[in-house]
Amino acid sequence: RAAFMFLEPGSMPPVGLAYIGVHMIFEIKMENFQFKARLVANGNETGTPTSLTYASVVSRESVRIALMLAALNGLEVKTSDIENAYLTAPTQEKLYTKLGPEFGPDEGQFAVIVRALYGTKSAGASFRNHLAECMLYLGYESCKADPDVWIRPAMKSNGFKYWEIILYYVDDLLCIHEDPTIA
């Protein structure tokens, strides 16, 4: 529901928005046998967006260099996954859909898509841009050699200066820090 702005019953979507269908995908995660359901947009139903849809990912070489720096500086390395990552980002596309039975009493109404749904053409770029804004807000800067390596100067408790490093690959993060749980 967070991905939609529900329109009043019987109202039509605003002019200038493109229609896109959505459907549910159900799966069982093999590593822990959990059930997972995800609402996915039918990206093949829309044209190419005018905004940039490319979303870069960290290079293998950058990961190797960062791990070497962690080892040389005695820093910890932690990984994490951002759950429902795309739904945290505002969408760049102007889309609407008609709600299906999975929306219960709202079935048949129109809704404007306001978050980057899986399946939309610019979802990856929308999330990457949103994450970059968050990193800048936290005081990190993007590395000139690899834009998916984010660095911030820091100091260990013993006075040793180093760089905090966060690398990201879509919605997976690698954090290198004296205490990565606080980075």
Image (cartoon, rainbow, N blue to C red):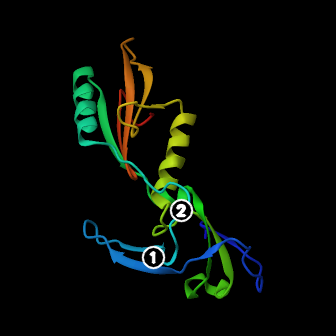
Residue 100 position by quadrant? bottom right
**Location of residue 73 with respect to 10 vertically, above or below:** above
Q: Say which element carries label 1.
A: helix
CA–CA distance in space, label 2 to label 1: 15 Å
Camera-side mark, 2 or 1: 1
- The residue type indicated by label 2 comes to Ala
| Residue placed furthest toward the top | 159
Name above or below for residue 22 compared with residue 126.
below
Image coordinates of residue 61 in percent, x first then y, are: 23, 37
* Residue 108, quarter of the rendered image: bottom right
Is 19 placed left or right of 16 in the picture?
left
The quarter of the rendered structure image containing the N terminus is bottom right
In percent of the image, x 77 and y 82: which residue is there? 11
How busy is the neighbourhood of tag 2: few (under 14 within 10 Å), some, or many (20 plus)? many
Q: Residue at x 22, y 35 (%)?
A: 64
Q: Disc 2 vs disc 1: Cβ atoms closer than 8 Å?
A: no
Identify residue for label 2: 116
Q: Nearer the viewer, residue 156 or 171?
A: 171
Mark 1: few, some, or many residues within 10 Å (few <14, many ≥20)?
Answer: few
Q: Amino acid at mark 1?
A: Asn
Position of 63 compared to 4: left or right? left
In the image shown, does 22 or 145 lie closer to the viewer?
145
Secondary-structure class at tag 2: loop
- Mark found first going from the N terminus, 2 or 1: 1
Q: Which mark is residue 44?
A: 1
Left or right for 93, reference 164: right
Q: Residue at the location (67% across, 86% down)?
A: 105
The x and y percentages for residue 153 are 44, 21
Q: What is the quadrant of the C terminus in the image? A: top left
- Residue 22 spot, x, y in % from top left: 52, 79
Q: Position of residue 46 (x, y in %)?
A: 52, 74
Q: Which mark, residue 66?
A: none
